[in-house]
Each structure stands twice: as C-alpha cells, then as structure tokens.
Amino acid sequence: MRALLCLALGAALVSTACAQETPKIIDIEPAAERSGELRRAPEFTQEDFDNPKYDNTALEGRDFHMVQGPPLKLHCYGVEKQGGAVMCRTKPNAKVKIGRSDDDFYYETADDRGYLLVGFDRDERRTIVEAEGNRLEYNFTPRDYDTSRIDGLPPSQVSTFTEAQLKRIRNASARKKKGFASRAQELGFTNGFELPIKEEFIKTTNFGAQRILNGEPKKPHYGVDLAAPVGTPIYAPADGIVSLADDELYFEGAMVLLDHGQGLISMYLHVDAITVQEGQAVKQGEQIATVGSKGRSTGPHLCWRLKWRNRNLDPELLTEWPNDDH
C-alpha cells in the first residue's frame, strides 16, 4: 500500500478575497516542495486564526500560502484534482459557501473545530469555497478516463426489465437512499484511507471509466474494480459507521456502505458475505465483508466507490490523504 502523504494548498488556489482589499499573496512554500502535486499540509493552531496579522518570522519553516493584510480565515489542503477532495479549516461552526459558480452554490457548516470536507466530482471543472470573507477557487484540468466495455451481460442487467424486476430496483433504490442519507458526527477519514484489500489483487477497472455494456453507452464507472478470489477479506479503509448492509440489491447484489462523516460515504459492491451490521461503528482495518460476484458482475471482484454528497470521488486518491490531524 502506498504511504499516506501530506499535502498543502497549492496550484488550485486562484484567488482569496478579503472584505477590505485585494490581498497580496506571498508564496513561502519552499521551492523543493513546489514541483510535485503532493505537498505538505499546513499545521495551524487557534492562535493563527485569532492573530490580527500573520508574522513571517513566526511562520518560518511552514509550507503554505499566506495572505498579507486581513487575517486569513480559510485554509484547505488535500488532493486537488477531479475525483479528489480537500479538508478546509475555518472558524468553528462557520457557514461555508460551496459552488461551481456564483449562480450555482449552497452552504455547508463546518464542525465544532472548524473542519469541513469538500469533494470534487469526476467531471468537476470549477469549485468555489468561501468562508469568513475569504474565497478559494479551484479550476481543474480534465482527467483522461478509460473506456470499459463489457459484453455478454443478460439483458435484464442492462436495459430490459420486467415489471417485477423494476419493483425490485425501486425497492433497492429506496434502501440505498436511506444509507446515503446517513450523516455521522465523527470524522473518520482524517488519518487517510487504506486500500480495502490487503491480500493480492488485480485492478481491472480504473475510476471514471466510460462504461459500454452490451454495446450501449452507460453512465461512467464511478468505482475502482479490484479482482480477487471469492472470500478474500475486505477491510474498512477508514473509521466509519455502517449505514447499509444489504444482500438483496438488484445491481449491486450485496453491498456495504460506510459513513465516514460529513457526507463522505464509501461503497463495497458485489460482496459475498457481509460481516458487519447497520449502525455498527468500525475502525480502520476492521473486516466488513468478503469479495464476491453478486449482482451485475462477471467475476469475483470488489467494486470500491466513494461519494461525497452528490459528487462521485476516486477512492484511490484518498489513499494519498494527509495522515496528520490538523
């Protein structure tokens, strides 16, 4: 498993708007850290937020962008690309504006320590994050996604459904909706994600691949497929609450949902045996299921997915998440 790395606010920072003036951006990030996509996350304290003006001397050795002038009250760090996510820090319980433009936005509330997760969809082109009079803008370069073709599926798993099958699909959708609506209070992902399979596996499909089923273009594949023998243990990649443990789903067959807090839900599809119960708290590394091939599946594998609110994220990217709790 790749090491968990720390990251810092970098190239995705386009502008930071303050109430009184347009601030001057001073880049105090060391040149050696500037070249790569992964950078060290800032270590902020409450004193930083309360300080009326940052002192360059006091900040010596820290790696982040700072604003000269009014106090900077919004910091974000993480994986700044389509399918990624950043952790933002602002004042406790602050309302944070999140949107794709000034005409398409909504508000989320930071937790009692001022933390708020912001995820970027597979096809996200621009995201605005604004709090306490400060604004960050992320503009994303489109990623190249694979094309995934699967032929030979039964028509009842692609586009031709009987009334009885449609009823099963609707019932399954209602149960999944309840699982996705879960909102755990504790943040279970601050120490990063681990891969959910520790034994040998083969990655057969990347996140975001355009699916073509029996020759018909379908929605993109929002998961990562990890092929392994039936019965291979599946482990929780981060702390969370089991919001769904259902083995009667139409397309997914059997699936587990883990709520990691603030609307971050990870999914484990086509599993063989579920080893947890709904409402159960699980720790990182605890077994939750075994690999199977139930539902719309052509062989034993784990389809691992990640969703934040209504945005589809790349779960592999969160294995690059910072492992320090700032």
Image (tube, rainbow, N blue to C red):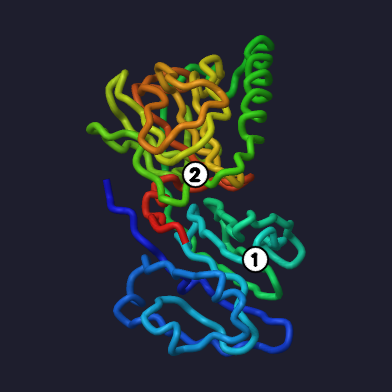
Mark found first going from the N terminus, 1 or 2? 1
Horizontal relation, residue 102 to residue 36: left or right = right
Q: Quadrant of the N terminus?
A: top left
Q: Which residue is denoted by mark 1 in the rendering?
A: 91
In the picture, measured across the screen, residue 255 lies left or right of residue 49, that is left
> Which image quadrant for residue 219?
top right
Q: Does 293 appear above or below 83?
A: above
Determine whether label 1 and label 2 are within 8 Å by CB.
no
**Residue 88 in picture, x, y percent from top left:** 56, 62
Residue at the location (38% across, 43% down)? 206
Which residue, given by chain and number where applicable, does mark 2 sit on?
188
Left or right: 215 with respect to 235? right
Label for residue 76? none
Residue drawn where x is 41% and y is 16% of the image:
273
100 vs 265, left or right, is right
The residue sitting at the left extreme is 200
Q: Secondary structure at mark 1?
A: loop
Q: Amino acid at mark 2?
A: Gly
Q: Position of residue 37 (x, y in %)?
A: 37, 67
Q: Foreground: 2 or 54?
A: 54
Measuring from the top left, give residue 49's x and y in whole percent: 59, 74
**Few, some or many C-alpha atoms within 10 Å of disc 1 (few <14, some 14-19, many ≥20)?**
many
Residue drawn at the location 50% of the way across and 57% of the way down: 82
Q: Position of residue 255 (x, y in %)?
A: 50, 24
**Is 53 located above or below residue 73 in the figure?**
below
For the residue labelled by badge 2, is the local secondary structure a helix, a strand or a loop?
loop
20 is higher (above) or lower (below) than 49: below
